[in-house]
Amino acid sequence: MTKEIYDMSTKTILKNAFVLYKDNFQTLISVSAFITLTLVAKQLWEATVGGKLNNSIGVFNGVTNLIVKFGLTATTTISSILLVIIISNFYNREEMSLSRGINVAKSKFWRYVGNSILLGLILAIPLLIEITIIRSQLSIIPKIVLAGVFSIPIIYLVTIFSFVMYLVCIDETSAGRLSKSKELCRGQFFKVLVINLVISGSLDYGFYIIKTIIAYSKVQSVLTNIIVELCAYSWFLFSTPFATCITIELIYRLLDKKDMVINDKPLENTDMENTINS
């Protein structure tokens, strides 16, 4: 197979990602629905039983609450890893049974947690500085200027390491994900910033944005809260698989463009391009 340097235009990436999403819609929505249900279950637990256990006295109640919350969080995380693995396999036209996919996702759980903690530590200092500036008693103009200046390293770090958690899911090699993510972004920084953080990020985190806006609004009726929750979770259900398709599409195109390999083999795939052009 002759290797093809893919078109890296934003339009092409989004178009191909939508084809990937549309062609595998039923499977992707099924996995996304399960993730959504685990989020709903966690919220319901915290609002009912979990809240009562937190306010009660006793080691047993505290441990029970901790175990249930950890179980729900772990289930959500493993399901999210599974979604990335499934989309990656669809992109590469590789077959994997659901049971095999779940086992692979489970095997990556602690590695996923470890890399999440590592990224949190990397971002901790600039984020703490940014929060300190925002909460300071400085006048508005100096505060805006300083916040803008210190947001630059945050945006830079978030962008160059934005592929790390995806590489945890799809790269079987044991290390080097930080350097691989950084290398993928080299020479493509603004492309990654726009596609992966602005477009894909807006889709992925629209769920939280909707809930945050309503949380700080003055409209807090029961009916309004129910409608908002339904809208937020519906957004999450349909947008999360598409946002993940966008990022997977971008990752494999960058890997191909830079002649990089993961899993000890070159990543070549012209099938999606042929699907678009046919």
Image: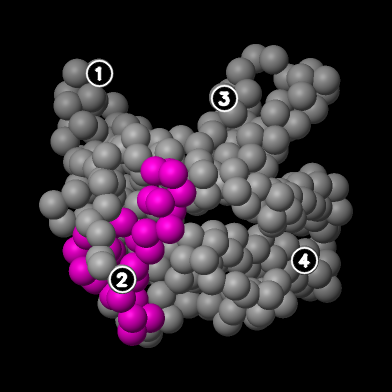
Residue type at numbered disc 3: Ile
For the residues marked 1 and 3, what is the alpha-carbon distance in whole angstroms? 23 Å
Task: Give yes or no for contact between labels 3 and 2 (Cβ–Cβ under 8 Å).
Answer: no
Quarter placement of the C terminus: top left
Tell which tag, 3 or 2, sits nearer the viewer.
2
Rounded to the nearest angstrom, the CA distance separating label 2 from label 4 is 50 Å
Label 3 crowd (10 A; few <14 / some 14-19 / many >=20) = few
Q: CA distance from mark 2 to mark 1?
A: 59 Å
Mark 1 or 4, nearer chain start: 4
| 207 vs 48: above or below | above
Q: Residues within 10 Å of mark 4 (few under 14, many from 20)?
A: some
Discs 2/1, front: 2
The number of numbered badges drawn on the structure is 4
Label 2: element kind: loop
Q: Position of residue 104 (x, y in %)?
A: 59, 79
Q: Amino acid at mark 4?
A: Val
How many other residues sit within 10 Å of disc 1, few (<14), some (14-19) or many (≥20)? few
Q: Secondary structure at mark 3?
A: helix
Q: Amino acid at mark 1?
A: Ile
Specify the farthest residue to the top.
218
In the drawing, what numbered circle is on residue 213? 3
The residues bearing labels 3 and 2 have C-alpha atoms spaced at a distance of 50 Å
- Residue with the mark numbered 1: 140
Find residue 271 and report its image quarter: bottom left
Q: Nearer the viewer, mark 1 or mark 3?
A: 3
Q: Is residue 29 left or right of residue 90?
A: right
For disc 2, the marked residue is 1
Sequence order check: which comes first, mark 3 or mark 2?
2
Q: Does 258 appear in magenta? A: yes
